[in-house]
Image: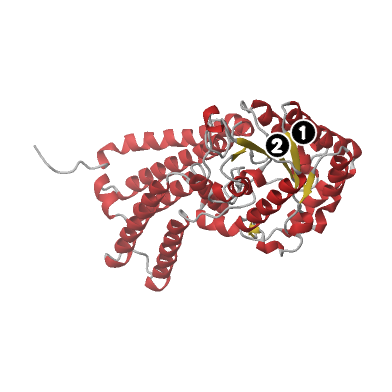
């Protein structure tokens, strides 16, 4: 029995059939993508949408690699193992295939499985070294692609892959969860209890005999950008007031008063004080209900819509892409909010939603304090929204802590997480906790 590796020349007909099948699979993939995948993308949550978008592209990569391999085998008429081991073109195809698979799977599991991502980078680096050895050590490269041109390209690709591997682990909060660095940050620091709050899982016995301070609000309350929840103003306030007090934070990113009312209604335990935290963008749901769309003022980009843009395929490119200032988008968003607060129907709907939160808390026997947050980087610029809300609440005789006068004494850059994340940082949370503690004591709102 011969131990020789079987040659592919005897199976040329089978390879031709395989190539023909692949040529049929490629248009089939395109048909399915156009009539099924893309039609269902909009209805899926973020990760499922990305997976369904990139899967056809991954299949295309597999098809094209096999197609290229088959064509090369037909061309050189050598054993398949010999071709895979020593053919420069096939190894270049394999390098491109591995790089493509890494790029297309990055957005599917953005912020997750970093170890597997790193293994992929190492595999690409090893394949790149193999291609370099075949090209310049064994001399199988074309004369025009000599070391003066080829080696710098190899060096640039190697440097890019090393930088990419570093950015797999760079965490940096962003004003949305758009950037991969922000998703990494949330993976590390954002833990939710079974009720969906960034809070410990309080049980009735934990609150028995305590004075319970309940906090409702959006990401400002939940502590977006704050790595340790103990640094939030809700937690700092409870520490300042003493061991008999306990804070329960019901803040959820992106909620307005309509959603905050639902969170309050579902809270199963008694509480003594409700601290309802308001911010300008709480008017979103009221605006949508009255037909005012954010998309009419700015192109809404939450960073979750999958594309083949390099910023969606590589962590390093994504980091720098989302680090560019976007002052025009901030101005467009401000125009949307001004239009919402100018519209009397929207404004009244929003104020009614705030009233509903307060009324529900009062019906459950809670003392209520409303805290008004301005734009931290432009305190005076938020008066158009803050002032009508404050006037409405004060006309109802409700205690209102307007943080604008206190926060206006500090430069905005000292109060925010970073220049791309306008949430309050640890310094701002500490100032709010101090101010709120003084306010509660002086107004007699503590039980």
Using the image, tell me which numbered label, if any, was put on residue 335: none
Look at the image and tell me in which quarter the C terminus lies: top right
Question: Helix, strand, or loop for circle 2?
Answer: strand
* 440 relative position to 94: left or right: right
Is disc 2 surrounded by few (<14), some (14 to 19) or many (20+) residues within 10 Å?
many
Residue drawn at the location 70% of the way across and 58% of the way down: 326
**Quarter of the image holding residue 155?**
bottom left
For disc 1, the neighbor class at 10 Å (few under 14, some 14 to 19, many from 20) is: many
Left or right of 346 in this view: 294 = left
**Closer to the camera, 388 or 442?**
442
In this view, the residue in front, 237 or 260, is 237
- The answer to whether the residue labelled 1 contacts the one labelled 2, judged by CB atoms less than 8 Å apart, is yes
Question: Where residue 143 sits in the image (x, y, percent)?
Answer: 37, 69
Residue 40 visible, this orientation: yes
Measuring 70% from the left and 49% from the top, which residue is drawn there? 436
Name the one closer to the observer, 302 or 190.
Answer: 190
Rendered-image quadrant of the N terminus: top left
Nearer-N-terminus badge (1/2):
2
- Secondary structure of the residue carrying numbered label 1: helix
Give how far apart the Cα atoms at labels 1 and 2 are: 8 Å
Left or right: 422 as drawn, with respect to 19: right
- Asked whether residue 291 appears in the rendered view, the answer is no
Which residue: 44% across, 66% down?
A: 156
Residue nearest the viewer, comparing 358 with 50: 358
Q: Which mark is residue 358?
A: 1
Residue 274 badge: 2
Percent position (x, y) of residue 124? 37, 54
């Amino acid at each position: 029995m011969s131990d020789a590796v079987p040659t592919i020349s005897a199976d040329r007909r089978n390879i031709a059939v395989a190539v023909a099948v692949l040529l049929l699979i490629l248009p089939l993939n395109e048909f399915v993508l156009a009539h099924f995948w893309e039609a269902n993308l909009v209805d899926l949550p973020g990760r499922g949408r990305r997976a369904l978008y990139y899967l056809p592209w991954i299949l295309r990569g597999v098809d094209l690699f096999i197609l290229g391999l088959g064509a090369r085998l037909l061309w050189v008429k050598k054993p398949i193992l010999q071709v895979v081991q020593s053919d420069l073109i096939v190894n270049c195809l394999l390098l491109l295939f591995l790089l493509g698979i890494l790029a297309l799977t990055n957005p599917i599991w953005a912020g997750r499985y970093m170890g597997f991502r790193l293994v992929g980078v190492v595999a690409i680096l090893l394949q790149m070294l193999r291609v370099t050895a075949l090209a310049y050590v064994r001399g199988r490269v074309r004369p025009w692609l000599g070391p003066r041109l080829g080696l710098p390209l190899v060096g640039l690709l190697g440097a890019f892959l090393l930088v990419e591997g570093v950015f797999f682990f760079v965490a940096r909060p962003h004003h949305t969860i758009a950037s991969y660095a922000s998703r990494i940050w949330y993976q590390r620091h954002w833990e939710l209890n079974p009720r969906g709050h960034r809070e410990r899982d309080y049980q009735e016995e934990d609150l028995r005999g305590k004075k319970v301070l309940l906090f409702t609000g959006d990401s400002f309350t939940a502590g977006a950008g704050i790595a340790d929840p103990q640094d939030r103003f809700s937690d700092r306030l409870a520490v300042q007031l003493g061991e008999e007090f306990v804070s329960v934070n019901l803040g959820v990113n992106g909620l307005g008063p309509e959603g905050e009312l639902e969170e309050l209604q579902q809270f199963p335990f008694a509480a003594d004080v409700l601290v309802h935290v308001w911010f300008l963008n709480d008017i979103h749901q009221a605006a949508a209900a009255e037909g005012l769309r954010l998309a009419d003022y700015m192109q809404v980009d939450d960073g979750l819509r999958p594309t083949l843009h390099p910023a969606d395929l590589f962590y390093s490119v994504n980091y720098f892409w989302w680090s560019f200032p976007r002052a025009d988008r901030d101005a467009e968003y401000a125009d949307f909010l001004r239009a919402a607060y100018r519209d009397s129907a929207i404004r009244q709907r929003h104020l009614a939603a705030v009233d509903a939160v307060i009324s529900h808390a009062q019906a459950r026997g809670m003392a209520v304090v409303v805290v008004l947050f301005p734009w931290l980087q432009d305190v005076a610029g938020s008066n158009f929204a803050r002032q009508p809300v404050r006037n409405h609440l004060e006309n109802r005789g409700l205690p209102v802590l307007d943080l604008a006068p206190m926060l206006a004494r500090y430069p905005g850059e000292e109060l925010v997480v970073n220049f791309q994340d306008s949430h309050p940082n640890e310094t701002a949370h500490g100032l709010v906790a101090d101010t709120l503690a003084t306010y509660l004591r002086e107004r007699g709102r503590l039980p």
